Image (spheres, rainbow, N blue to C red):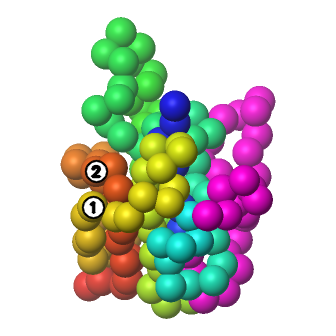
Amino acid sequence: MCWVLYVAADVPLPEVPWNQDRPAFNVSRIPSLESPVARQFSKPYLHRIGAHTLCGCGFDPTQVNERHPHELADTKQSLGALREYLYGVVAATGPVELFTCWDGDQERPPEHRFRLTPQDFTPAMRWLPEGTFATVEAGAA
């Protein structure tokens, strides 16, 4: 089972294609199978955000296997790309909404609510708990 991270905005967001030969941060429109997640959001344009793992598991530093040191570097790179992506979309479109859950739990109501800024997405952050809904908006530069 995979961790999924969704983002919703008032306008369509830039997509970042998945490249199987060079796994990295990616953003795509949600597949129709996952459309029930729309109930979590007030904004109409939904996308799925993935890390180097394709899914959202690669954003969580606690899921890094210590026997594979490259995984921590990959996770840091994915979090850095997420932060930069959020900076860009928030600056261009205004606040966005995020929702995290395990795949299959897209319709479960959020258990946690946060207000975040792109600056909060660092390798040192405690990754978002299951069932998090967050509004991401510009913060102090």
- Residue drawn at x 36%, y 9% is 67
Residue 110 position within the rendered picture, expressed as x and y whole percent measured from the top left = 34, 64
Badge 1 local density, few (<14 within 10 Å), some, or many (20+)?
A: few
Q: Name the secondary structure under disc 2.
A: loop
Q: Amino acid at mark 1?
A: Glu
> Which mark is drawn over residue 121?
none
- Is 21 in the magenta? yes
Name the residue beneath numbered marker 2: 129
Q: CA distance from mark 2 to mark 1?
A: 9 Å
- Is 25 in the magenta? yes
- Quarter where residue 55 is shown: top right
Q: Name the secondary structure under disc 1.
A: loop
Name the residue beneath numbered marker 1: 111
- Residue drawn at x 65%, y 51% is 26
Compared to 29, does 11 lie above or below? below
Of 130 and 28, which appears nearest the observer?
Answer: 130
Q: Are marks 2 and 1 in contact (CB under 8 Å)?
A: yes
Of 47 and 39, which appears nearest the observer?
Answer: 39
User: Magenta stretch?
Assistant: 8-36
Q: Is residue 51 left or right of residue 26?
A: left
